[in-house]
Amino acid sequence: MPTIVFYVCIIILAVLNYGISELFSKSKIRMYFVNKKSRIVLVRDRFHQQTFLSIFFEIISYFVLLVPLVNRNCGADTEQYYIIYRFGDRALEPLFIGFLDLLKRFVDNPKTGIGLVGAVSLLIVFCAFHILRDYYSTTLCLLAYCTGLYFYLYNYVRMMFAASIIILAYTFILKGNKIVSLICMAFAIGFHKSAVVVLLAYLIYFLFQNHKALLTIGSIACITIFLMFPNNLINMIKDERFSNQVNQHQLNSTTIGFGTILRALPMVILIFLLYRKYKDNNEYFGFIFAQIINLGFSLTGYFVPVTSRLANMYFVYHIIFFMPWLYQKEKNKNNKYIYTFLYVLYCFFSFYLLSHNFKTMKIDPYY
C-alpha cells in the first residue's frame, strides 16, 4: 500500500471513530446563576454529557493514531532520538531530558521509550480536545490536527511535545482561563525553547486584549519589520543546522513560498468575511490575532525556513479551534453544513501540501 494512502486511511479511521463517539454523547441542559455587571442572571446552558460508549470510541480513535506512531522506524530524526534516549544530551531542554530519564527507569529500549514520548504527546492533545467536548464539536479539531500536525510527530519529537502542550494551552484560552494557558506555554518551553515565541505573543495579546486596534496595528507592524529586515531574525537563530539552511537557501515551496499563501488564504478569507458579525466578540478577535501571527511567521519563512515551522506547529489556534467555535455560534443549520464541508476540503488540502514534505522528513515510505 502506498504510504500516502496508508496515512489517509489513518486519518479517516481516527476521525470517523471520534465522530461516532460524539454521536453517543447525551445532550443535556444545565441552569445556573452568574453575576453580570452587578446583576444576577439565570443562564440556561446546553452541553453534551459523555457516556461509556462515547469515551470508548474516543479511546479507539486514540489507538488508531497511536499504533502506527509507536511502531514506526522512519523519520529523519528518529535515530538521533534513539541515541539521545540511550546516552542523554544535557544540552537539550531540562524537562525533556528529565522526562527521558524518568522513562529510562522503566523502559530500557530506545524505540519503546521514544514511542512512549509520542504516546504522551498524543494523549495531551486528546485530553485538550476532551476538555472542550461538552460544548464544541471537537471532531473538527481532531480532523485539523490529523491533517496538519499529527504526522510531524513521526519526526519532530521534542518540538511536537511542546506543540501538544501549546494546544492544551489554547484549550484554556477558549475556556477563558488565561493564567492556566500561560502556565502551559511556559511549561512547553522546557521541552523545546522555541515555544518561548508563543508565550511572548500571547502575553502581549492578553495585556492589550482590550485595545484591539493597537494590538492589530502592532502585530502588522512587527510582521512588516521582520519582512523588511530578515537578518534580525537570522541573528536570533543559534542552531547551526538552521543557519546552514538559511545560507544554502534550502527553501521548500510547499511550506514557504506560494504554498504558504495557498494554506493561509482560505482561513484569512473566512475569518475576515465574518468580521461584521462577530467584531465585538473577544473570542473572535483572538482568532484574528492568531491568524495575523501565523501569517507573519509563515511569510518570514521566505527568508528563514525555521519560522514557517513555528507557524505550522505552534500558531495553529485559529486552524484547530475556529471552525468548532463557529459551528457552536452559528444558528443557521445550512450555514453550519456549508462551513463544515468547506473546512473538511481545506483540511485535506492542507494535508496534500504537507505530504510534499514527507520525503524530506523521511516518513515516506513508512516502515
Image (cartoon, grey):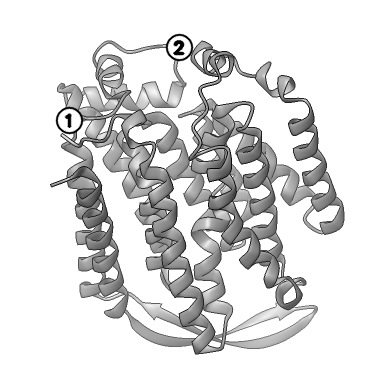
Indicate whether 262 appears above or below 325. Answer: above
Indicate whether 71 appears above or below 273. Answer: above
Indicate whether 52 appears above or below 196. Answer: below
Q: Quadrant of the C terminus?
A: top left
Q: Hey, what amino acid is under mark 2?
A: Ala
**For the residues marked 1 and 2, what is the alpha-carbon distance in whole angstroms?**
23 Å
Q: Residues within 10 Å of mark 2 (few under 14, many from 20)?
A: few
Quarter of the image for residue 90 reads top left
The x and y percentages for residue 353 are: 43, 47
Quarter of the image for residue 86 reads top left
- Please give the name of the residue rendered at 49% of the width and 69% of the height, measured from the top-left corner: 324
Question: Which residue in the protein does label 1 denote?
Answer: 112
Quarter of the image for residue 233 reads top right
The x and y percentages for residue 362 are: 29, 29
Question: Which residue in the protein does label 2 denote?
Answer: 91
Left or right, residue 298 beside residue 63:
right
Q: Are marks 1 and 2 in contact (CB under 8 Å)?
A: no
How many numbered badges does the structure rendering display?
Answer: 2
- Please give the name of the residue rendered at 77% of the width and 45% of the height, measured from the top-left corner: 219
- Asked whether the viewer can see residue 294, the reply is yes
- Please give the name of the residue rendered at 26% of the width and 54% of the height, measured from the top-left corner: 8
In terms of depth relative to the viewer, which is nearer, 321 or 354?
354
- Tag 2 or tag 1, which sits nearer the N-term? 2
- Please give the name of the residue rendered at 37% of the width and 67% of the height, measured from the top-left corner: 139
Left or right, residue 272 beside residue 100:
right
